[in-house]
């Protein structure tokens, strides 16, 4: 190694060392000294190098540590930054719940409004309380009550809203605290980062300075090495090594610089990131500020709304207050007017108080006199009652007398005709054609076309085929109710077999006849009088067949019963052994009818035939007692479904059939005789001529009422029988009442005549009315018939039909 140094010439190479001598010794000594000095110098330099190396290593280590620390710090900061960004985002999302804020604000506004309302209401209430108590019914009281209610409601609402507001306040407070905390943390971390940055840059500066110092130091070392190289190869070698070492160290320093540069780069990057983060934070902050601004604006608007609402409420309250003031003024004037009234009332009250004080004495006095008056009144009422009772009894007697008189005048025997409709059983052809017509102007007239000749009859009433069971019952119900008053009543159904007798009397289950309807009516009438009268209704069911009387409700229906005089000498008749059933309801009646029907059925094989040859009787007895007078009444209602009136004898019947016919004829003739005798008021009435009339004696005589229902078949083939029935009916009806005619009537009403009736040959009694519509050509009215009756009341000759 050749190091050209100016001083090097003094220590030149071997060119000078060839000169040994005395003068060379000091030079050698000098050289040795110099060598030793160099050696020392080298040792020192080596020490210095070692120290430098150590220092460098330390620096390296330091730098390494600093670099790792910085990296760790940068990582840490990055993490913190990410965490803070997240935290900021989270907080933003939490705080950014604008709905919640709005809701809270709305609630605050509502709460404020309610508070205002409440204050207003409280003020109003206070004022109202301060006022004099209003009259209970006036409008103010109602208004005040309403206001109170409203106030209570508002207070409840306010309480609720207060609670909710407090909750929201708490929530907002918590969030604000957390935001402040986060902001604080953010600031702290920013400060920390700035500090760290400062510290790092300081350390970087220090390192740079140290490096610069180190750079400056190697020059003398080089110089020394050069010097040493000149002196010794060993030293040279050492120097070379040292230089290599130095080289290596310089490389290391270069590398360290490189690393440092990288680190600086990293630091720069970190600084950039920090700057970016700062920018972001700034942005967030500005956003927060903007949101805050918005919030303030909204709050401002709400404040304005609130003020407006308050103003409106205030205006409303003022109007209301005005109304209340006006009302109050009215109430005050009312109070002023009421004061005199109150004075009068007080006076009255005092007067009343006095009266109340004196009242017990007055009351006792009044009670005494009232008692006396009541006693007197009771006495008077009693005597009036007695008088009334006496009058009532007299009136009852009078009524009965009047009724009897009326019955006598009207005639106590009425005859009604009923024409049944044409049925399937009548068959077809000319024989089954209709032979009966009616008068549209007079419901008492019936026209019959018999063998081509029209014959007309007048009865009390005629029911055409379309008449209902109820229509017929309507006509007879007055008779039926009279048995409650103690009258005896007989209703007979008369007519040939198949003319509708049983239908009219019994009817069907769906459409009952007179029997059932009569009992129903009696029940309801009795019920109506139940407060004054006690009634019992009993029924007996009997039949008369071949002049033998049988009890259809008895245990032995085949047993023949006798009619006897009462042993008490009253002259009344009775039938020993005839069963009487007490009935109280329609069900009872149905049971009784069913029982009677069963007895009749088991007795005879051909019931239809049998029933047409026997008389069926339903005897209803109504016994009543008047609670107040003790008066007793007994009325009897006899409902009789007579045997068929057809003339069997004429057709040459023999044996039992002839006997039956004779019995029937006998009893029907006897009935005719009795009715005739009764109407003409004869002294002797031949009741005993048949079982039927004998049994019904007490229901046919005296003030009893009789109704004959003449049943008629409308068809052509039955006209002969129809003619007989109608003639019989008309004769019964037209028996004269005058005393002069009595005997004559009696004479003309022979029991045999019943069988003698015939369309062509029979003559009617002088009083009978048979009108040929062809001979008069005009409809017959009731008045004309009465006129004629009067005209023919003398002994005129019978008129042949
Ligand atoms: P009677 O008892 O006179 O022999 P019924 O009462 O047995 O006659 O009547 C004969 C038939 O005519 C029965 O089938 C009955 O139902 C019917 N009949 C009678 N009158 C009427 C009426 N007013 N309406 C309808 N059908 C009737
Ligand atoms: Mg019959």
Image: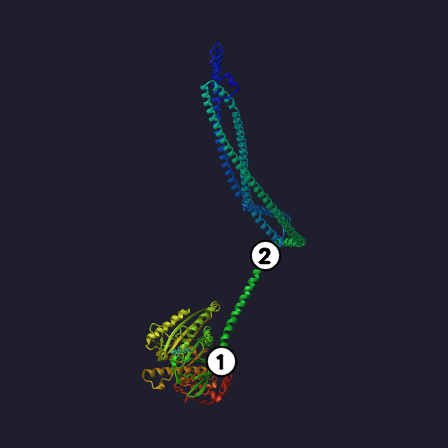
Q: How many marks?
A: 2
SS for tag 2?
A: helix
Q: Earlier in the sequence, mark 2 or mark 1?
A: 2
Q: Is residue 577 visible?
A: no
Q: Is residue 801 left or right of residue 318?
A: left
- Is disc 2 surrounded by few (<14), some (14 to 19) or many (20+) residues within 10 Å? few
* Residue labelled 1 has its Cβ within 8 Å of some atom of ligand 1: no
SS for tag 1?
A: helix
Quadrant field for ligand 2: bottom left
Q: Nearer the viewer, mark 2 or mark 1?
A: 1
Relative to 65, residue 679 above or below? below
Q: Position of residue 663 (x, y in %)?
A: 36, 82
Judging by the rendered image, the residue that carries numbered circle 2 is 363
Q: Is residue 365 visible?
A: yes
Q: Position of residue 574 (x, y in %)?
A: 39, 75
Q: Position of residue 546 (x, y in %)?
A: 35, 80
Q: Is residue 557 left or right of residue 277?
A: left
Relative to 95, residue 587 above or below? below
Q: Which one is in front, 689 or 434?
A: 434
Q: Residue furthest left?
A: 655
Relative to 479, residue 648 above or below? below
Quarter of the picture containing the C terminus is: bottom left
Q: Which one is in front, 665 or 391?
A: 665
| Mark 2 and mark 1 residues within 8 Å of each other at the beta carbon | no
Judging by the rendered image, the residue that carries numbered circle 1 is 410
């Amino acid at each position: 190694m050749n190091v050209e140094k100016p001083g090097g010439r003094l220590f030149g190479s071997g060119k000078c060392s060839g000169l040994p001598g005395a003068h060379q010794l000091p030079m050698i000594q000098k050289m040795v000294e110099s060598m030793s000095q160099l050696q020392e110098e080298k040792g020192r330099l080596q020490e210095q190098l070692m120290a430098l190396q150590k220092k460098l290593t330390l620096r390296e280590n330091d730098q390494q540590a600093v670099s790792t620390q910085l990296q760790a710090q940068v990582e840490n900061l990055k993490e913190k930054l990410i965490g803070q960004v997240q935290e900021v985002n989270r907080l933003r999302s939490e705080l950014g719940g604008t709905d919640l804020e709005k809701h809270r604000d709305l609630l605050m506004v509502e709460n404020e409004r309610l508070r205002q309302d409440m204050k207003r209401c409280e003020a109003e209430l206070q004022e109202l309380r301060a006022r004099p108590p209003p009259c209970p019914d006036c409008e103010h009281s109602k208004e005040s009550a309403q206001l109170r209610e409203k106030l209570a409601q508002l207070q409840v609402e306010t309480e609720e809203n207060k609670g909710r507001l407090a909750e929201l306040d708490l929530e907002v407070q918590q969030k604000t605290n957390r935001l402040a905390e986060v902001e604080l943390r953010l600031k702290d971390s920013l400060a920390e980062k700035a500090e760290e940055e400062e510290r790092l840059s300081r350390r970087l500066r220090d390192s740079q300075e140290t490096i610069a110092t180190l750079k400056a130091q190697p020059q003398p070392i080089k110089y020394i090495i050069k010097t040493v190289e000149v002196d010794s190869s060993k030293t040279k070698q050492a120097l070379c090594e040292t230089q290599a070492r130095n080289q290596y160290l310089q490389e290391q320093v270069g590398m360290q610089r490189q690393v440092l540069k990288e680190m600086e780069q990293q630091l720069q990057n970190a600084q950039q990131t920090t700057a970016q983060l700062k920018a972001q934070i700034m942005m967030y902050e500005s956003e927060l500020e903007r949101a805050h601004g918005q919030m303030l604006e909204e709050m401002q608007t709400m404040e304005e709304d609130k003020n407006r609402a308050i103003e409106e409420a205030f205006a409303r309250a003022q109007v209301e207050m005005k109304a209340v003031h006006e009302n109050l003024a009215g109430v005050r004037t009312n109070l002023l007017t009421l004061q005199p009234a109150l004075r009068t009332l007080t006076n009255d009250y005092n007067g009343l108080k006095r009266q109340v004080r004196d009242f017990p004495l007055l009351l006792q006095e009044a009670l005494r006199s009232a008692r006396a008056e009541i006693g007197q009144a009771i006495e008077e009422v009693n005597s009036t009652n007695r008088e009334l009772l006496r009058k009532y009894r007299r009136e009852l007697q009078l009524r009965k007398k009047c009724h009897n008189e009326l019955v006598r005048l009207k005639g106590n025997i009425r005859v009604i005709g009923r024409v049944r409709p044409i049925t399937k059983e009548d068959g077809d052809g000319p024989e089954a054609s209709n032979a009966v017509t009616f008068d549209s102007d007079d419901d008492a007239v019936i026209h019959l076309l018999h063998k081509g000749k029209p014959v007309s009859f007048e009865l009390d009433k005629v029911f055409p085929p379309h008449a209902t069971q109820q229509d017929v019952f309507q006509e007879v119900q007055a008779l039926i109710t009279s048995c409650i008053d103690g009258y005896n009543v007989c209703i007979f159904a008369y007519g040939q077999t198949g003319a509708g007798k049983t239908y009219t009397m019994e009817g069907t289950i769906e459409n009952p006849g007179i029997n059932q309807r009569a009992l129903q009516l009696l029940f309801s009438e009795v019920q109506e009088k139940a407060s004054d009268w006690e009634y019992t209704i009993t029924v007996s069911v009997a039949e008369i067949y071949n002049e033998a009387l049988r009890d259809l409700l008895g245990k032995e229906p085949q047993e023949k019963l006798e009619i006897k005089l009462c042993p008490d000498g009253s002259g009344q008749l009775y039938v020993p052994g005839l069963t009487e059933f007490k009935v109280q309801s329609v069900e009872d009646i149905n049971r009784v009818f069913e029982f009677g029907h069963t007895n009749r059925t088991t007795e005879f094989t051909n019931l239809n035939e049998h029933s047409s040859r026997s008389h069926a009787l339903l005897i209803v007895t109504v016994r009543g007692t008047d609670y107040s007078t003790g008066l007793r009444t007994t009325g009897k209602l006899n409902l009789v479904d007579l045997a068929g009136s057809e003339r069997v004898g004429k057709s040459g019947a023999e044996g039992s059939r002839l006997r039956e016919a004779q019995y029937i004829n006998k009893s029907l003739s006897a009935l005719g005789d009795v009715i005739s005798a009764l109407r003409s008021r004869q002294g002797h009435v031949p009741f005993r001529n048949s079982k039927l009339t004998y049994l019904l004696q007490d229901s046919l005589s005296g003030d009893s009422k009789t109704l004959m229902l003449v049943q008629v078949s409308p068809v052509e083939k039955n006209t002969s029988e129809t003619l007989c029935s109608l003639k019989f009916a008309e004769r019964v009806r037209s028996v004269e009442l005058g005393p002069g005619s009595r005997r004559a009537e009696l004479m003309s009403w022979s029991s045999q005549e019943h069988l003698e009736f015939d369309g062509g040959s029979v003559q009617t009694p002088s009083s009978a009315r048979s009108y040929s519509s062809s001979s008069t050509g005009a409809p017959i009215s009731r008045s004309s018939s009465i006129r004629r009756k009067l005209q023919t009341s003398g002994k005129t000759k019978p008129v042949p039909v």
